[in-house]
Amino acid sequence: MTDSAAHHHDPAPVDELYQEHTDDVGGERLRAVMRRVASPVTVVTAAAKGRARGATIGSFTSVSLDPPLVSFNVQKPSAFHAVLREAETFAVHLLGEAQADLATHFAIPDVENEAQFATVPHTRNGDGLPILSGTFGVLHCEPWAVHDAGDHSLFLGRVLRVDGGEAAGPLLYYARSYRAVGDEV
């Protein structure tokens, strides 16, 4: 066996939905291929009209540096979507690799407004916005724009302030589970 052959690795198996080639792309086919893309995991919190909500978001990304903009998608209709549409500010919490429990907690959609925060360490700002404790960063934002995006809305927020937090590697979502960053390649 040659030296180059000894270092050859077979590619990881892919599911049948990913291997098929077709021009008919439906939601399940898209979901199957997107499971192979690692996504950052954040929790976004918002408050409006005496209601506070949080949701786990896997579509978070930076959009612009000037002005400083971030974006994420929220399923509609949902209780979180309704509160976020009315909120004057919101907070994006960057989760560390040891915070999968927070991501799981805020991924449950049917929990009543205040019950979401009953067991989660947090503080409230003057507007009642919940700020989760112990994350590795919080982006304090104001709404910049909302765009219709099929069964979701695309929210853009202007970052007003960045708070650093606990030093940690980021929490990722990949292949239906929470993960940490692996070795550098």
Image: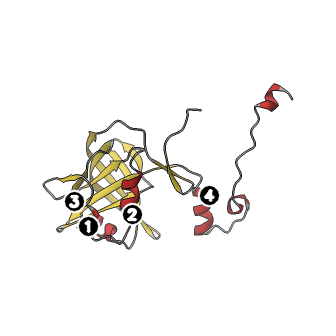
Image coloring type: secondary structure
**Residue appearing at x 44%, y 46% in the figure:** 171
- At label 3, counting other C-alpha atoms closer than 10 Å, the crowd grade (few under 14, some 14-19, many 20 or more) is some
| Picture coordinates of residue 34, whole percent (x, y) | 57, 57
Q: Which mark is residue 147?
A: 2
Helix, strand, or loop for circle 4? helix
Q: Are dots 3 and 4 in contact, CB under 8 Å?
A: no
Q: Earlier in the sequence, mark 1 or mark 2?
A: 1
Q: Amino acid at mark 2?
A: His
Residue 85 occupies quadrant: bottom left
Residue under numbered circle 3: 88
Residue for badge 1: 115
Q: Name the residue tied to disc 4.
A: 33
For badge 1, the amino acid type reads Ala
* Disc 1 secondary structure class: helix
The answer to whether residue 101 of the structure is visible from this angle is: yes
Q: CA distance from mark 1 to mark 2?
A: 29 Å
Quadrant in the picture for the N terminus = top right
Marks 1/3 in contact by CB < 8 Å: the verdict is no
Q: Earlier in the sequence, mark 3 or mark 4?
A: 4
